[in-house]
Image (cartoon, rainbow, N blue to C red):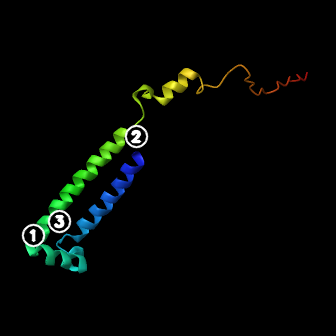
């Protein structure tokens, strides 16, 4: 199920990219290329911008909704919502054991007193 939702999310994101690039911006965007001319021929001059902006709004809403749905479905269960550090402290795996701890010692040298 999650694989299907992620695939659908990727397709929606690609469609959203294409629709945003097809819109006429101040610099012209990709609407001056063949895709924009086809859209203008189908919808007319002004309604093409309205249709593309509505389609962008719908695709953005679907994109956000799918992102929330995927994050809710794939989140871990509420039973394991503890802290990883606290769990490791309780297990004792963070602190080293002092049982077999041997520290290096400096050999003491006796000073010979010269009389």
How crowded pointer 1 is (Cα within 10 Å; few <14, some 14-19, many 20+) is rated as few
Q: Position of residue 84 (x, y in %)?
A: 49, 30
The answer to the question of whether label 2 and label 1 lie on touching residues, with beta carbons closer than 8 A, is no
Mark 1, residue position = 47
Q: CA distance from mark 2 to mark 1?
A: 40 Å
Q: Position of residue 57 (x, y in %)?
A: 18, 57
Identify the element where label 2 is drawn. loop
**Relative horizontal placement of residue 38, taking residue 74 as reference (left or right):** left
Mark 3, residue position = 52
48 above or below 93?
Answer: below
79 above or below 36?
Answer: above
The residue lying at 13 percent from left, 70 percent from top is 48
Q: CA distance from mark 2 to mark 3?
A: 32 Å
Mark 2, residue position = 74
**Relative horizontal placement of residue 89, taking residue 112 as reference (left or right):** left
Instruction: Pick the residue in front: 101 or 44.
Output: 44
65 above or below 32?
Answer: above
Instruction: Pick the residue in front: 39 or 93.
Output: 39
| Residue most extreme to the right | 115
Q: Check residue 84 in the rendering and tell me which mark sits there, or answer none.
A: none
How crowded pointer 2 is (Cα within 10 Å; few <14, some 14-19, many 20+) is rated as few
The residue lying at 38 percent from left, 54 percent from top is 7
**The N terminus, quarter of image:** top left
Q: Which comes sooner in the sequence, label 2 or label 1? A: 1
Identify the element where label 3 is drawn. helix
The residue lying at 24 percent from left, 76 percent from top is 35
**The C terminus, quarter of image:** top right
């Amino acid at each position: 199920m999650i694989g299907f939702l992620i695939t659908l999310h990727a397709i929606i994101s690609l469609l959203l990219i294409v629709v945003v690039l097809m819109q006429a911006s101040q610099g012209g965007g990709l609407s001056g290329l063949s895709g924009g001319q086809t859209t203008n021929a189908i919808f007319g001059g002004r309604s093409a911008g309205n249709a593309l902006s509505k389609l962008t709004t719908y695709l953005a809403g679907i994109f956000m909704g799918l992102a929330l749905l995927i994050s809710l479905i794939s989140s871990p269960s509420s039973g394991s919502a503890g802290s990883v550090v606290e769990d490791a402290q309780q297990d004792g795996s963070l602190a080293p054991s002092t049982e077999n701890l041997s520290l290096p010692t400096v050999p003491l040298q006796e000073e010979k007193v010269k009389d």
